[in-house]
Amino acid sequence: MVKAAVLNGVGEDLQVHDDIEQAPPSAGEVKIKVVASGVCHSDLSVQNGTIPLPTPMVLGHEGAGIVEEVGEGVTSVAPGDHVVLSFVPACGDCYYCNRGQGFLCEKSAMAAAGGMLDGSTRLTLDGQPLRQMAHCGTFGNYAIVPEISVVKIDQDVDLRYAALIGCGVLTGVGAALNTANIRPGDTVAVIGCGGVGLNVIQGARIAGAEKIIAVDMFESKLKMAEQFGATDLVKADDGDPVAAVAALSGGRGADVAFEVIGLGPTIEQAINMTRNGGEAILVGVPRMDVMLNLNAAFTFLYLAKTVKGCWYGSSNVHEDVPKLIQLYKDGQLMLEELVSREIGVDGINEAFTAMGQGEVARSLINHTH
Ligand code: APR
Ligand code: ZN
Ligand code: ZN
C-alpha cells in the first residue's frame, strides 16, 4: 500500500490516503521508495487550476529516492540505487534529445495526462485509477516511474537535499547556466525569490554575475535572496521595480532579467527592465490565458531584446544532475539552505499556505517521518 497526498478536484485541499494500491513496475519502469519531495509552486498551481491537469492525481514532481524494484528490460538502474526523479522523461534518442534539448523529449507527451508512458496508471484508489503528476507523484512514499525519468546519483548525497534538484535546482540554476548567456561581470535581475528564483540567483552567482538584483514582495524572501548571492534588493511594492533596476544599472537595465513567478505584469516588468540587446528569461509558469502587452517595434526591433522561454532550465537531466551534484560537493551550490521546513506528507496543505505567505523557500516532505 502507498501513502500519498491526492488532489481530487481543482480548489480542494489534498487528501492523504494510506490505502492506495500499486501494481508492480511494467517493462521499462522502476519502482522508487521516495525518500523526500520538495513542495513547489507548480504543485500549488495544479491544486488551484493555474496548471490544468486531470484528477484524481498524486501531486509532487521534485523528489529523490531509492530504487526498490525494476521492470523487464531496465538496465540503467538496479535495486538499491539512489536516484533523482526528473519531471520530464528524457529518452536520449528522439529528435529533441539528439539536439541537446532533452527537456522537450518526445516521450514527455503523456506527462500531462498523469499516466505512464503508455497512458496507463499503476496506482488505484478504491478501484479507481489514480494519476501521478509528471510521471513522478512524489507526494507518495512509493512511485512507479519510467526508467528514463530517473537519474542515478552517488550514494553519499543526502536524498533529502538531492530531492530539490528534481525541479527547483534544475529549473533555476539551469535557467542561469543553460538558458541565459550570463557573462562574468554582468548585471542580472531576478523577479520572484521563491524556491526556484533563489536557484536562479545562485546560478547567476556561479555564472559570474557581478550585480544580482533580487525583486520580491516579501522582506523575508529578499533576506534569503541575499544569502544565495543577491547583491541588491528591491521590494516589489516600493515603487516601480523597472525603475529601481534601471537606477541600479547606470540607467541601462539588466544584461539578463528573469521572471520566476508566472504573472503577466511581472513578465512585462522583466522584459522592460532588460537593457537594449539584453535577454529576458521567462521561467515562471503562467495561467493558460495570460497574454502580454508589449510594443513589438521597440521591444524586439529598435531595442533588440531577446525573450527566451525556459522549460525545466533547458536541462539535459542525465548530464546536468551529475554536474549539479558536483557543484554541491564543491561547495558552490547551496541545497540545505533551501529547506525552510521538514514535514510529513500530512502537513501538505499547511505547506501550501506557508508558500503563499512567503514564509518558506521550500517545505520538504520527508516520507520516512
Ligand atoms: N512581485 C514580486 N514578487 C512576487 C510577486 C510580485 N508581484 N508575486 C509573487 N512574488 C514572489 C513571492 O513572494 C515568492 O517569493 O514570487 C515568489 C514565488 O515563489 P514560490 O511561491 O516559492 O514559487 P516557486 O516554487 O519558486 O515557483 C516559481 O516557477 O516552476 C515555476 O510554477 C512555478 O510559476 C512558478 C515559479
Ligand atoms: Zn527524447
Ligand atoms: Zn516544480
Image (spheres, rainbow, N blue to C red):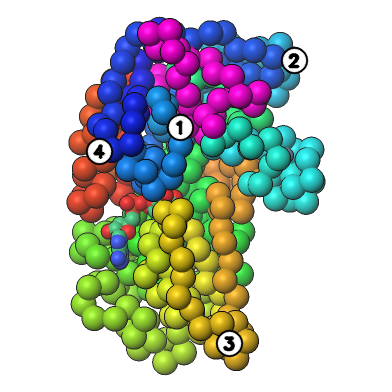
Magenta-span inclusion, residue 139 = yes
| Circle 3 residue | 297
Decide: is 142 above or below 209: above
Q: Which residues are magenta?
A: 113-141
Across and down, in percent, residue 148 comes to: 66, 30
Local secondary structure at mark 4: helix
Say what amino acid the circle numbered 2 marks. Gly
- Is 286 left or right of 92, judged from the image as shown? left
From the top left corner, tell me how far across and down residue 330 is, in percent.
52, 49
Question: Could you tell me which quadrant the N terminus lies in?
Answer: top left
Q: Give me the residue at 63% from left, 46% from top.
A: 103
Amino acid at circle 3? Ala
Instruction: Give the class, few, some or many, for how many residues have Cα within 10 Å of label 3's Cα (few <14, many ≥20).
Output: few
Mark 2 → mark 4, Cα distance in angstroms: 38 Å
- Residue 213 in which image quadrant: bottom left
Judge the density around disc 4: few (<14), some (14-19), many (≥20) Cα neighbours within 10 Å: many
Does residue 57 sit above or below 359 in this rendering?
Answer: above
